[in-house]
Image: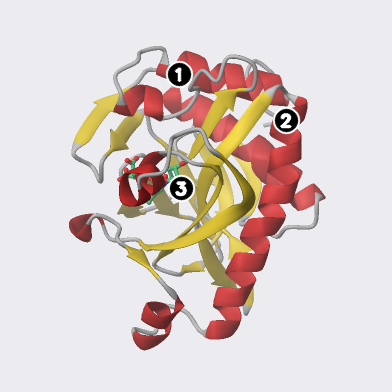
């Protein structure tokens, strides 16, 4: 499947139409951004690493019965996906306190949460992705209640699968963000799952191995993403099936 016109260009990925109106090409660029686009840099090999990382995770989730938009890898930086009607929402689950939760509530970073915390954020960089609740979602019709329930259910199902997968690899899945959309009336996982949108720590040393390395200028960003991928079982050097 060849990409045709650029439909949308985000901070790290571009989306293209294909000859099939139900399918899109995701192009993972080397661009890296944080703080709602205020910090930006191109990091060599990032597109390839995130494309393969995402494909691996999406396939693991599909095998566990979670529906995703992922169809197949097309090239080093491209994947074919189903076109979803995206909800303008971000679903965050936290297993360990970090990031904005600590700033907002004064919680000590690294505190293990007995029960995971779920939060919705509005996907809007101009507003700084504010946290919203189900009353806001209903009032402004960002998603119908039945879909809100589905998003929560599936985000927790992803947690069960990935927390175990990361733990087996000697990693802690601290928190992550998912985005969902509708495909033929069903809530389906879209966007990506890569170290750009989650926090991952080494279980022994608690070293940060995710985009916090970029946010905090710690260096070795892509090396860390690749290390996480290899520990999980991503084969970065394997020839593509095409
Ligand atoms: P936070 O601590 O900044 O609220 O982020 C929680 C997790 O969700 C963290 O792994 C980063 C991810 N996230 C994004 O990738 N993009 C976003 O816009 C938001 C709000 C969170
Ligand atoms: N992914 C979000 C953004 O780019 C949050 C962050 O990375 O700081 O705005």
The residue positioned 66% from the left and 57% from the top of the image is 156
Q: Quadrant of the C terminus?
A: top right
Residue 120 seen in the current view: yes
Query: Which residue lies under the disc numbered 3?
Result: 3
Residue 187 appears in the figure:
no
- At mark 1, the secondary structure is helix
Asked if the residue at label 2 sits under 8 Å from ligand 1, the reply is no
Question: Dots 2 and 1: beta carbons under 8 Å?
Answer: no
| Horizontal and vertical percent position of residue 77 | 49, 32
CA–CA distance in space, label 2 to label 3: 37 Å
Query: Disc 2 vs disc 1: which is toward the camera?
Result: 2
What residue is drawn where x is 62% and y is 24%? 229
Q: Quarter for ligand 2?
A: top left
Of pointers 3 and 1, the one earlier in the residue sequence: 3
- Between disc 3 and disc 1, the foreground one is 1
Q: CA distance from mark 2 to mark 1?
A: 21 Å
Q: Earlier in the sequence, mark 2 or mark 3?
A: 3
Q: Residues within 10 Å of mark 1 (few under 14, many from 20)?
A: many
Q: Which mark is residue 167?
A: 2
Q: Nearer the viewer, residue 160 or 61?
A: 160
For the residue with label 1, is its CB less than 8 Å from the closest atom of ligand 2? no
User: Does residue 194 appear left or right of residue 121 in this picture?
Assistant: right
Marks 3,1: beta carbons within 8 A = no
Circle 1 residue: 222
Name above or below for residue 136 compared with residue 32.
below
Residue at x-position 49% and y-position 13%:
223
């Amino acid at each position: 499947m060849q990409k045709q016109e650029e439909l949308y260009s985000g901070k790290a990925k571009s989306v293209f139409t294909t000859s099939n109106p139900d399918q899109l090409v995701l192009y993972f660029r080397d661009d890296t951004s944080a703080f709602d686009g205020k910090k930006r840099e191109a990091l060599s090999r990032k597109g390839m690493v995130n494309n393969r990382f995402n494909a691996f995770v999406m396939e693991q989730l599909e095998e566990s019965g979670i529906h995703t938009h992922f169809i197949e890898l097309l090239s080093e930086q491209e994947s074919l996906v189903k076109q979803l009607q995206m909800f303008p929402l971000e679903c965050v689950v936290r297993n360990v306190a970090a990031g904005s939760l600590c700033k907002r509530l004064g919680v000590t970073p690294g505190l293990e949460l007995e029960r995971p915390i779920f939060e919705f954020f509005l996907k809007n960089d101009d507003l700084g992705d504010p946290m919203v609740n189900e009353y806001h979602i209903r009032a402004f019709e960002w998603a119908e209640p039945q879909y809100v329930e589905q998003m929560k259910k599936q985000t927790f199902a992803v947690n069960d699968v990935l927390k175990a997968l990361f733990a087996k690899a000697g990693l802690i899945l601290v928190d992550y963000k998912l985005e969902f959309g509708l495909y033929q009336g069903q809530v389906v996982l879209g966007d990506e799952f890569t170290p750009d949108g989650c926090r991952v720590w080494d279980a022994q040393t608690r070293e940060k191995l995710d985009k916090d390395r970029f946010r905090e200028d710690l260096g070795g960003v892509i090396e860390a993403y690749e290390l996480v991928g290899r520990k999980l079982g991503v084969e970065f050097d394997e020839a593509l099936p095409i």
